[in-house]
């Protein structure tokens, strides 16, 4: 079984979602199925089929989250330190072409959300930055050609 690295925050988010699915969504869909059954002929009951489909989706989500949590290798970022970029680091960079500044935290694959400044450990940018220090320049292949970023700061938050 392959371990899945994730931050403590990412694990907590999964746990919260699992609890929501089990305590709110699952009972809700069971009630909807019961109500649809009461309407009679199930072969032509669109409400029943929609509720059963939703139930299948919810059960699939629960199984997927439980699997991720079972394989989780939770890394407490607050106990990490150093100037080298590694999993959990918050890295400030400057795009050498546009002089645009950005800050990213390197997180597990399922926690990634670029809008929140979280990039996956397997993303090209994260892979290029791993092991580097402030002052280093990394080259990242993109569909429109290579991009260069200078690492300006590595923090552990």
Image: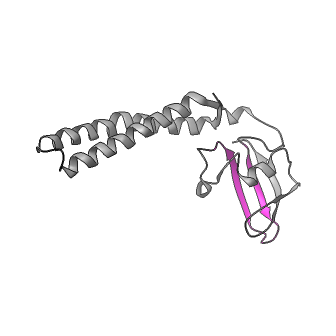
**x and y, in percent, of residue 79 in the image:** 72, 31
Overall secondary structure of the magenta stretch?
strand
In the image, taking residue 27 as reference, residue 113 lies left or right, namely right
User: Vertically, is 119 above or below 101?
Assistant: above
Instruction: Let me know if residue 154 is in the magenta part.
Output: no
Q: How many marks?
A: 0
**x and y, in percent, of residue 103 in the image:** 71, 56
Instruction: Let me know if residue 107 is in the magenta part.
Output: yes
Q: Residue at x 78, y 61 (%)?
A: 141
- For the rendered model, the colour scheme is one colour
**x and y, in percent, of residue 42 in the image:** 17, 44
Q: Residue at x 70, y 41 (%)?
A: 88
The quarter of the displayed image where residue 99 is located: bottom right
- Indicate the quadrant containing the C terminus: top left, top right, bottom left or bottom right: top right
Magenta region, residue range: 89-109
User: Vertically, is 125 above or below 62?
Assistant: below
Q: Nearer the viewer, residue 42 or 101?
A: 42
Q: Nearer the viewer, residue 155 or 116?
A: 116
In the image, taking residue 25 as reference, residue 82 lies left or right, namely right
Q: Nearer the viewer, residue 92 or 54?
A: 54
In the image, taking residue 12 as reference, residue 152 lies left or right, namely right
The quarter of the displayed image where residue 54 is located: top left
User: Vertically, is 113 above or below 30?
Assistant: below
The quarter of the displayed image where residue 121 is located: top right
**x and y, in percent, of residue 8 in the image:** 60, 34
- Indicate the quadrant containing the N terminus: top left, top right, bottom left or bottom right: top right
């Amino acid at each position: 079984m392959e371990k899945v690295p994730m931050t403590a925050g990412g694990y907590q988010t999964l746990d919260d979602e699992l609890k929501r699915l089990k305590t709110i969504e699952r009972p809700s869909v069971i009630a909807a199925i019961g109500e649809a059954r009461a309407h009679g002929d199930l072969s032509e009951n669109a409400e029943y089929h929609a509720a059963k489909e939703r139930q299948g989706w919810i059960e699939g989500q629960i199984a997927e989250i439980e699997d991720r949590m079972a394989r989780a290798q939770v890394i407490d970022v607050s106990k990490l330190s150093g100037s080298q970029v590694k999993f959990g680091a918050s890295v400030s960079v400057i795009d050498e072409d546009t002089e645009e500044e950005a800050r990213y935290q390197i997180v597990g694959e399922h926690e990634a959300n670029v809008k929140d400044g979280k990039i996956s450990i397997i993303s090209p940018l994260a892979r290029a930055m791993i092991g580097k220090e402030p002052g280093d320049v990394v080259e990242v292949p993109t569909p429109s050609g290579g991009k260069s970023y200078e690492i300006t700061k590595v923090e552990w938050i």
